[in-house]
Amino acid sequence: MTSLAIFLAACALGLTAGVTEVTAEEGSGTASVTERGALTTRALQDLGSWQGECFPWMKRIVGESLGLQMGFGYRDGYLKAGATEVDADEARDGDVIQLVDDNNAGPGASYPGLHTAIVMDNYGDGTYQVIDSNRGWDGIVTTHHYDPFYAADRYPNISVHFWRFPDTGGQTFVADTDDGAGGGNVAAADLEVGDLALVAAGGCLNLRATPTTGAQILTCLSDGAVVEILGEAVEAGAYTWREVSAAGQVGWVAEEFLAPQGSGAQTPPPNTSPTATPTATATPTATATPLPPAETGAAGVITAGDVPKNGGVGLVVFGGGTTESLLASAEASGCRALSVWANRAGGGLLGYITGAPAFVNLAWSEQYGESLPSDTPLVLSCAGT
């Protein structure tokens, strides 16, 4: 199980690198940008939805919003679209942050630290409000406070680049930045009583007893948590508040950090627990299902490890067989798998996202074909059943 332990540690690094975990309504800095360009306007439409890996999603957004065709490399791709590099202190809404090893920036690059994010606001201190996909290894689009230089320093040979695309005359809109934190969800105004929404706070969102920042905090809802809208919007202080039901409690949240459920591509069913997002400290809980000893190489079943019944992350060994049999074995043990992670041949991480389009899982299919080998170590991310 040594290789599996190393793999999980790599996952943990990827989950936390460069992310300053602050509660949404208390973000640091004041946004200097009040006008969103075509690129971020389009990107925000995907907030809270499943969109897959960060770089392909960004390329798609560039094409749809600016009409520019990018190439396939993590440098040449930008140059083909006419993008130019800018200094970190000049970065603004619509620029793209690219973390990359400059000596390994081709289209096949895959290693810890490689990441792409779209700038929304520049706080002037080397940190930014960004929107990106897959920062939590879940393919979900979120906004969050980001320090790319801290993220780059955690891995060897990673550089930070800021790219600006040419102006193609895209339309702009005025964003609501009255909350002082920046990065709020502009689609939240579309929410109606009875709707379900997803938390998109870039960390966690305070659920308060009354609609004011001075009220008691009942809990903090993680990104991806589902809430039900119970009442009309209430303006109080710097925020627009909505009464919601979430995590078995009723309280108030800042509307700016909610996204309509199903507002983009397919969204995998999120775990509504306040601690749903896997972190570096995530371990199988007491409710995990211990698997009995099984014959090594038993095909089609999980032969060892702990499968978390009610959601979370678990280390397992699969006896070999199709991906479908793996998912069926997990479900039989009480895990509705959201994703599965394995060691990539040649190094790095390889993920399979349940229910995602075939092209998203292409790398998984190329590595395993019709069947995973016996005694394959894996990490399961489960939503429970």
Image: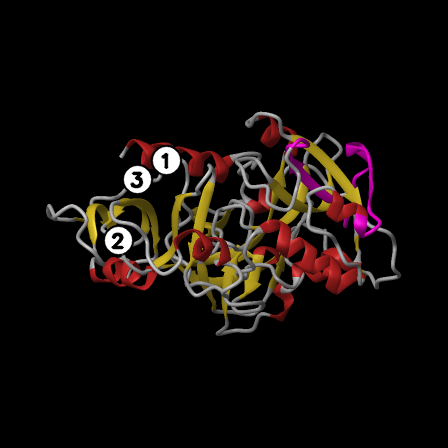
At label 1, which amino acid type do we have? Thr
Q: Give the range drawn in magenta.
A: 80-103
Tell me if mark 2 has few (under 14), some (14-19) or many (20+) residues whose alpha carbon lies within 10 angstroms of its own.
many
At label 2, which amino acid type do we have? Gly
Q: Which mark is residue 281?
A: 1
101 and 365: which is toward the camera: 365
Q: Residue 283 carries which label?
A: 3
318 and 21: which is toward the camera: 318
Quadrant of the rendered structure where residue 248 is?
A: bottom left
- Whether tag 1 and tag 2 are in contact, CB under 8 A, the answer is no
Look at the image and tell me whether residue 175 can be seen: no
Quadrant of the rendered structure where residue 151 is?
A: top right
Q: Which mark is residue 320?
A: 2
Residue at the (54%, 50%) spot, across then down = 134
- Whether tag 1 and tag 3 are in contact, CB under 8 A, the answer is yes
213 and 225: which is toward the camera: 225
Q: Earlier in the sequence, mark 1 or mark 2?
A: 1
Q: Which of marks 2 and 3 is nearer the N terminus?
A: 3
